[in-house]
Image: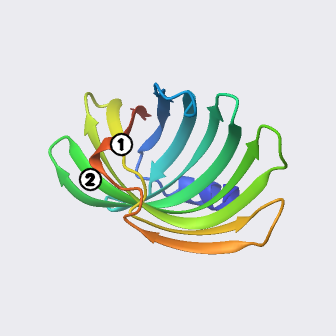
Amino acid sequence: MVALFAAVTMNAQNEMYVGGTLNFQTKANAANKSVITVAPEIGMSLNEQFGVGAVLSYTASQDVYNAFTINPYLRYNALEIGKVKVFVDGGIYYRNVKPKDADADNYFGLNVTPGISYNLTDNISIVAHANPVFNVDISSPAVGDSQTTVNLLRTFNVNTFNFGFYYNF
């Protein structure tokens, strides 16, 4: 991924971005503890329609688990109207989930995730990512057999958008 990123940098259309999202959730139910996710992101445009990028994320669920994910992606800009862009990211990911009192589980997969961005200025954008509309997840648990699951619209709804910012240069 690093070699691909370096190779296409020379042909970039002058648009790179860094940013990401920060999420916090808490529920009144004692069984569902607070969860925080930090997800920095970097990417670049290859042309008007396509770009590449990567998200690194860390999630901590109070007294339950910690998770680390790396998700490089290919971005397709589906629609641009003025300062608004609608895009779809197709990515591959690796996730390591470490429950509090157990061995870590590993996940590999593919995902298709829609998003939208709005350019506040030439350099600052607000971005919103939905949960994946499609994913293939291959789990390799510390205990038990590996599983493959295919999901279509399983976690997608309007209540699950993650909001963040991009700095464009």
Residue 156 horizontal/vertical position (percent): 36, 56
For the N terminus, the image quarter is: bottom right
Residue 16 horizontal/vertical position (percent): 46, 43
Tell me the residue that label 2 is attached to. Answer: 86
- In front: 146, or 115? 146
Q: Residue furthest front?
A: 30
| For marks 2 and 1 on the same chain, the one whose residue lies earlier in the sequence | 2
Mark 2 crowd level (few <14, some 14–19, many ≥20, 10 Å Cα)? some
Up the image or down, 135 lies above or below 32; here it is: below
Residue 22 horizontal/vertical position (percent): 49, 29
Q: Quadrant of residue 166?
A: top left
Q: Could you tell whether 110 is left or right of 48 in the image?
A: right
The amino acid type found where label 2 is placed reads Val
Secondary element under disc 2, as helix, strand or loop, is strand
Q: Residue furthest left?
A: 82
Residue 161 is labelled as: 1
Secondary element under disc 1, as helix, strand or loop, is loop
Q: Do the CB atoms of the residues marked 2 and 1 lie less than 8 Å apart?
A: no
Mark 1 crowd level (few <14, some 14–19, many ≥20, 10 Å Cα)? some
Up the image or down, 56 lies above or below 76; here it is: above
Q: Mark 2 or mark 1: which is in front?
A: 1
Q: Residue at x 28, y 47 (%)?
A: 158
